Image (tube, grey):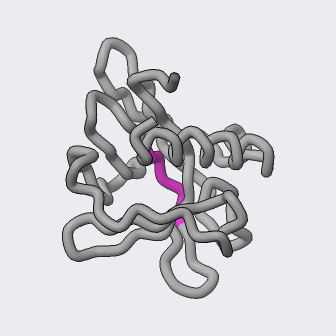
Amino acid sequence: MLPDSLASPVWLLAGLGSARAVWLTWDGGMVTCSDADSLVFSVPVQELRHVRFPWYYFGRGLKVRVRATEYRLSFIRPGASSYAIPRMQLAGGAEQPTVVAVRDVVQTVEEGRAAWRSWREKLRGG
């Protein structure tokens, strides 16, 4: 059984060789994707559409549609990604963003796959 809250550093893939570090969080039935400067999306889990875990991401990413936009997320840092991400600390339901260097939270392949498995279970209703 997974906890009610889940937060993972992920990389928002945008085009060939372009990615930026963001946080993907699940809290109280809301799924949020954001960085220190902007909100990518924040919706109730029921509004996520076409959640897929393509085989060609090799257990490291997912695709999801929010409203009219499809997002591609990687749980493993791609080669061309940003170098700072916000850390969302869920304490008593409050989010407190602070910026930390990616080197402090870079995920190994094992850590990324573990996060991917948790998100897959959560998004598939586990």
Q: Residue at x 57, y 78 (%)?
A: 18
Residue 65 on image: x %, y %:
32, 68
| 124 sits left or right of 115 in the view | left
- Image quadrant where residue 56 sits: bottom right
Looking at the image, residue 71 sits to the left or right of residue 43; the answer is: right
| Rendered location of residue 14, percent (x, y) | 49, 78
Residue 3, compared with residue 99, is above or below; it is: above
Report if residue 22 lies within the magenta region: yes
Residue 12 percent location from the top left of the image: 49, 65
Measured from the top left, where is residue 4 in percent x and y?
A: 39, 23
Between 22 and 46, the one lying in front of the other is 46
Q: Which residues are magenta?
A: 20-24
Q: Is 88 located above or below residue 113 in the figure?
A: above
When the figure is inspected, residue 87 is found, relative to residue 59, above or below; the finding is above
Residue occupying image coordinates x 32% and y 44%:
31
What secondary structure prevails in the magenta region?
strand
Query: Is residue 31 rendered to the left or right of residue 12?
Result: left
At 47% across and 65% down in the image, what residue appears? 52
* Residue sticking out furthest to the bottom: 16
Q: Nearer the viewer, residue 106 or 5?
A: 5
Judged left or right of residue 16, residue 36 is: left
Front residue of this view, candidates 63 and 22: 63
The image shows a total of numbered marks equal to 0
Please report the residue visible at 59 percent of the width from the left and 61 percent of the height from the top.
61
